[in-house]
Amino acid sequence: MASSVQKPKGKWVSKVEPLFGFDLRSLAVFRIGVAIILIADLLIRAKDITTLYSDAGVLPRTALINEILNPWYWSVHLLGGQPFIQGVVFLLAGLIAVTLLVGYRTRLAAIASWVLLISLHNRNPTVLFAADDMLRALLFWMMFLPLGACYSVDSALNSSSKPLPKRILTGATFALTLQIYYVYAFSAAFKTTSDIWFPKLTAVYYALSFDQYAAPLGQFLLNFPPLLVFSTFATLVLEWIGPLFLFIPWRTTFFRCATIITFILLHIGFGLTLHIGLFPALGIFVWLVFIPTEVWDALSKRMYTPQRAGLRIYYDADCGFCKKVVYLLRTFLILPKTPLQTAQDDPSIYADMQEKNSWVVVDWQENRHFKWEAIAYVVSLSPVFKPLAYILRWRPLMAIGTKFYETIASNRKVAGQFTAPLKFRPVEVQSSRVLNIVTLLLFAYVTVWNFRSLADARSLKQTLDPNTLAKIDRVMKSRTLNSLDWISRLLRLDQSWSIFAPAPPRDDGWHVIVGKLKDGSEVDLLRNGGSVNWDKPTIKQRNALYPNMQWRTYFINLNRAIGNKLYPYYAEYLCRTWNEQHQGNQRIESLDIYFVEERTVPPGETQDLEKKNQWQQSCSGEE
């Protein structure tokens, strides 16, 4: 692909681009947000590498392959079952996510992140939630987008003299736009098949009543039934109609900004009322990709103050390390119009550079700054990182920073080895006909798959007459479509946006795991060997029992149909880990896994409790 040249836009492009094109700055912010989610997700999961992702945990590879994994699903994580191997793959994924965050070899980083994310998800599908499906779908389309054209190492070291376009319209921008729309539209379609969402309008009541997701504010809101009814109606309307405002062809900037703000507030509401992991944060970052060019231009104009306009930075022309650093600083401190000049071009500046052994920063009043103090000054002009300048100027840190700067300045060759992998390369942004065709075909496939998922919903089948249902099945389950199923499995494009749909879960309750020791006593294995307690856990206690979304999802799945496949391996894990840590009469002989069912009932009705023995396990083999 060649570097882009601004060409006159055709009439249809001018009309479509505001609706399906992305500003390169919006793509960059979107990239940063998704990378943050990737890193946060890996850090959260890393605490459970042994338990959830190794053969020593609750789902060994043999159990996964024989009992659960789809034949077309694949995973790099299956190459080894030892915690160390899993740790290495996790570390690799984390490092690649960091390169995506800073925008170094951005397309390769996006591809590698997508590969390792699929691998991670396929290693243990029983701990996946809506945010995982959404993240996987987003990363797929990100591979085809120019994510590194702004606010990145790639853009900082762009060697091309040709200007980049502000916006780009491609098959991938079209696909990502509609993919985000599908998340909400198909979720609303699933919801509409249940009378709990409409006309009963009790869905938010059931969602906030589900203790596995309960947050204190959500439970507090249960005291306001009219608000719950309104929230149910508003959520359904927003998901059906809200994203359509992205496609209004007049006053597009106004409607886009209003839509972005509305959905960000919606996801903030989700995060405040429900424990649903990273889903609210991911939902917020997703909408940043739609920030209009007019907003960025207005911000840029407002930020271009006399202080920033008068800033000039001089570096040593003979120091490749110095050149790379100043270009990186200009990019990541968001000072795009700052001139970067070689000190040798100005005798006075060059003399100061040699005398101080330092770069030279000239402010708008022609004052010159050197060494660490110059760094603090440049940071103080950054529209994003300005608060850091106060820390950098803290006297003790100033002394340490100056010493650090002097050490680097005296050892430029050594420092240059760290930046040697960073090369000046041309940034390439243009629409490729081949990629457009590929992405549009893939998106058409995704569209069909989403309709197939909806058509396969049990709640929809219950609302359709047999003749209509037969016609839908004839199309959606045709031999042609079935023959293409492997594509969705291989690329993990098998999407179903049934988030709290067709209805929020009502199979509420909690687990109690009773372990019988050799001395005849009983302990609760979920509570670190404490006394057996059948009382309903509080939100605080649940947060201790299920410290992250992965564990919440796993215990929910234990109570679903897939639980019959999971219980044997979970029970073996409990026996093994307990007996590895205890000796003599404190070793466990057997255990019983109970589920105290507290099915959520309609408002005003009394909930009944039912204690079910889900699994019994002898631990005699764990000696």
Image: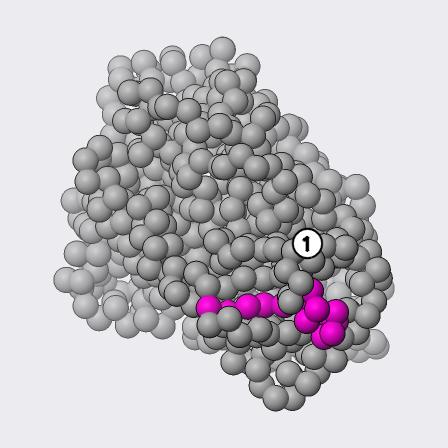
Label 1: how many Cα within 10 Å (few below 14, some 14–19, many 20+): many
* Residue, disc 1: 324
What is the x, y in percent for residue 353?
70, 68
Q: Residue at x 35, y 23 (%)?
A: 9
For residue 109, which quarter of the picture?
top right
What is the x, y in percent for residue 443?
45, 25
The span shown in magenta is 350-364
What is the x, y in percent for residue 273?
34, 65
Image position of 54 with respect to 449: above or below: below
Which residue is nearer to you in this view: 424 or 148?
A: 424
Q: Is residue 220 magenta?
A: no
Describe residue 608's horizontal placement relative to residue 310 as left or right: left
Which residue is nearer to you in this view: 325 or 102?
A: 325
> Looking at the image, can residue 119 be seen?
no
Q: Residue at x 51, y 57 (%)?
A: 338
What is the x, y in percent for residue 503?
32, 46
